[in-house]
Structures are given as C-alpha cells and as structure tokens.
Image (spheres, rainbow, N blue to C red):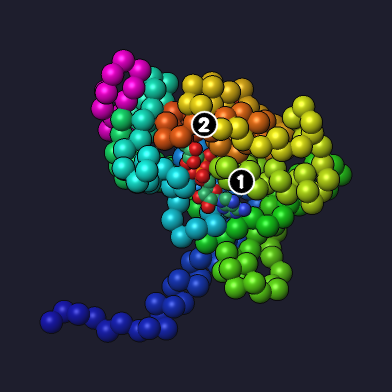
C-alpha cells in the first residue's frame, strides 16, 4: 500500500492558513458584490475577466441564488435572444424553444457560470452576510460582514470591514444593501421617492424591459443589479425568465469596468 500517513493537524492548518490568506488578500477590493444569484455572478464574471479585483459575499452555503430551481422547481430556465447571447458567451448550452424563447438546464447554467466566474478570478466568500456598510463623508467605502451563523444563532459578535471602491447590491428581491442605506443611514436613494419603492407583481415583459434601465448607481459608489434593481425602482418581478438578470449583471460590470480599467 502506498498510502502515505495523514496528519489531522496538518489538514486543519492547511485550511486555516490558506483561508486566512485569502481573506486578508481581499480585505481591500475594487468591487464587492453582495449576493451570489445570477446577476451577482455574471457581474463578477465580466469584472474578473477584465482583471478587476472583485469579491462576492453570499449568505448561503451555495451560490446560484434563485436560478437552481427554474420555475416551480422544474429545473429549466427561459431566456430571450439577449440573454441567450450571454449564456453562450459563458459557455452554457442553450436550446431554442420558439422564436426569442430559449431554455437552459438550470443546473448546467448555475454550475457553468460559477465555474467560469471563479476561474476568471471572482473570489467568493460564502456563508458570510453583509450586515452593514462603511459610509464615510456621504459615500459608501465598503462592506461590514459577519458569518451567517452569527445571526442564525442570534449571537452578539462584532463583524469585520471590507474596503471597496464600489459595491453592487445583487441581493435579489429583498434588496438588502439598498434597505440598509435607507433605513440605517437614512440616505435618500436615486429613486423618485428617495426610498426603496418595492417590487410590483409579476409581469415578465415589463420586468425584463425595466431592469436594464434600473441597473445603475443609487448612491455614491453603490450600484443595483438584478431583481434588487427592480425592487428598488418599483418595477415588476418577472418569474422564471432569467435574461434580465444576466443582462443586468453584464451591464453593471460594463459600467464599473469603464471606471476602473
Ligand atoms: O435572489 P437571487 O437569485 O437574485 P438575482 O441575481 O436573481 C433573481 C432570480 O434568481 C429570481 C428571479 C428571476 O426572474 O426573479 O428570483 O437578482 O440571489 C440573491 C442572493 O443574494 C443573497 C441571497 O442568499 C441570494 O443567494 N443575499 C441576500 N442578502 C444578502 C445576501 C446579504 N445581506 N448578504 C449576503 N448575501
């Protein structure tokens, strides 16, 4: 038997040392994305591909957000022409259903996007949630993060800070970063009312159309993308069509690449 001896302490040290180095390396980034759904992951993919130093914080164990379950847990997603182009750019197999309607297996879609994004250089920190923002001189300068298990266990444990030139709120329907800005920092957002307007009932066509326009900066250095953008600006949700999320992720990446690269 050529099985070499394994030392349990070496295994533990390997994890602790490499993770600590990774976290220390990413205490300062160009872009910090909050939320690992399709919008956040696609933004991370295009930013990383251009050499931007970008990290993504995801509360849950797995990234992929609402994409895994397709519609009603039938694991297929639908995209239109523009969404199809992005899936193909990333390498996700797409099938034509009808003119302007394409389907993709949601497991292939999520796993391919995750793989391409992380290999391009997106650094993902899962099991970590954003509980606050670093706001100085009326602009956001980064995130305040903690382990998800701390809030789950209702523990009083202080968080750590991540410095970031730009923040993307890709937290989906709850638009948590935007709510933090509004409720905690009492900041007026770039919406008509100055508040998070809240998403409207499902209407695929209008939801998809509005998302492009809603993907923008809502406060100095904070951008909204994906369902968070529609929730902030009061546009409809769109159900299991995912093209808008992909387009929004690519759009916000393009805006930040112009500023950074
Ligand atoms: O919900 P989610 O997939 O957002 P998205 O990228 O895509 C929306 C679609 O999945 C679907 C839809 C399609 O038409 O409407 O819902 O806009 O992913 C958001 C991710 O953000 C995480 C959350 O766990 C989810 O995986 N998240 C939310 N708040 C926080 C967070 C937080 N404070 N810190 C860290 N992660």
Residue 174: which numbered mark, if any? 1
Q: Kindly give the residue lying farthest to the top in the view shown.
A: 99
Residue 202: which numbered mark, if any? 2
Position of residue 80 in the picture relative to residue 42 (left or right): left
Give the residue drawn at x 49%, y 21%.
205
SS for dot 2: loop
Q: Residues within 10 Å of mark 2 (few under 14, many from 20)?
A: few
| The C terminus: image quadrant | top right
SS for dot 1: loop
Give the residue drawn at x 54%, y 22%.
206
| The N terminus: image quadrant | bottom left
The image shows residue 22 at horizontal and vertical percentages of 53, 60
Tell which of 124 and 22 is nearer to you: 124
Question: Mark 2 CB in 8 Å range of ligand 1?
Answer: no
Tell me if residue 245 comes above or below residue 157 in the rendering: above
Q: Bounds of the magenta span?
A: 92-102
The residue mark sitting in front, 1 or 2, is 2
Q: Residues within 10 Å of mark 1 (few under 14, many from 20)?
A: some
Tell which of 256 and 93 is nearer to you: 93
Tell me if residue 216 can be seen.
yes
Tell me if residue 151 comes above or below residue 205 in the rendering: below
Question: Mark 1 CB in 8 Å range of ligand 1?
Answer: yes
Position of residue 155 in the picture relative to residue 90 (left or right): right
The image shows residue 104 at horizontal and vertical percentages of 30, 34
Tell me if residue 144 comes above or below residue 235 in the rendering: below
The image shows residue 69 at horizontal and vertical percentages of 37, 46
Q: Is residue 98 magenta?
A: yes
Q: Is residue 25 magenta?
A: no
Q: Kindly give the residue lying farthest to the right in the view shown.
A: 137
Residue 18: which numbered mark, if any? none
Give the residue drawn at x 61%, y 35%.
199
Give the residue drawn at x 61%, y 46%.
174
């Amino acid at each position: 038997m050529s099985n070499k001896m394994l030392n349990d302490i070496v295994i533990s040290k390997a994890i602790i040392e490499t993770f600590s180095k990774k976290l220390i390396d990413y205490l300062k980034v160009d872009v910090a994305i909050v939320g690992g759904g399709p919008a956040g992951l696609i933004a991370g993919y295009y930013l990383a591909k251009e050499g931007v130093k970008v990290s993504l914080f995801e509360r849950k164990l797995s990234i992929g957000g609402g994409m895994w379950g397709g519609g009603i847990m039938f694991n297929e997603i639908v995209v239109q022409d523009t969404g199809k182009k992005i899936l193909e750019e990333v390498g996700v197999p797409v099938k034509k259903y009808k003119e302007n309607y394409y389907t993709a297996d949601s497991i292939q879609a999520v796993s391919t996007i995750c793989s391409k994004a992380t290999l391009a250089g997106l650094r993902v920190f899962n099991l970590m949630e954003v509980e606050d923002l670093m706001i100085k001189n009326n602009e956001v300068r980064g995130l305040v993060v903690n382990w998800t298990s701390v809030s789950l266990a209702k523990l009083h444990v202080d968080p750590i800070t991540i410095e970031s030139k730009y923040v993307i709120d890709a937290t989906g329907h709850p638009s948590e970063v935007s709510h933090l800005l509004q409720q905690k920092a009492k900041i007026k957002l770039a919406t008509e009312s100055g508040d998070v307007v809240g998403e409207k009932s499902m209407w695929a066509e209008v939801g998809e159309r509005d998302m492009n326009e809603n993907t923008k900066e809502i406060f100095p250095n904070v951008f909204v993308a994906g369902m968070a953008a529609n929730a902030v600006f009061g546009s409809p949700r769109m159900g299991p069509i995912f093209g808008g999320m992909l387009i929004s992720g690519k759009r916000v990446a393009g805006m930040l690449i112009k500023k950074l690269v």
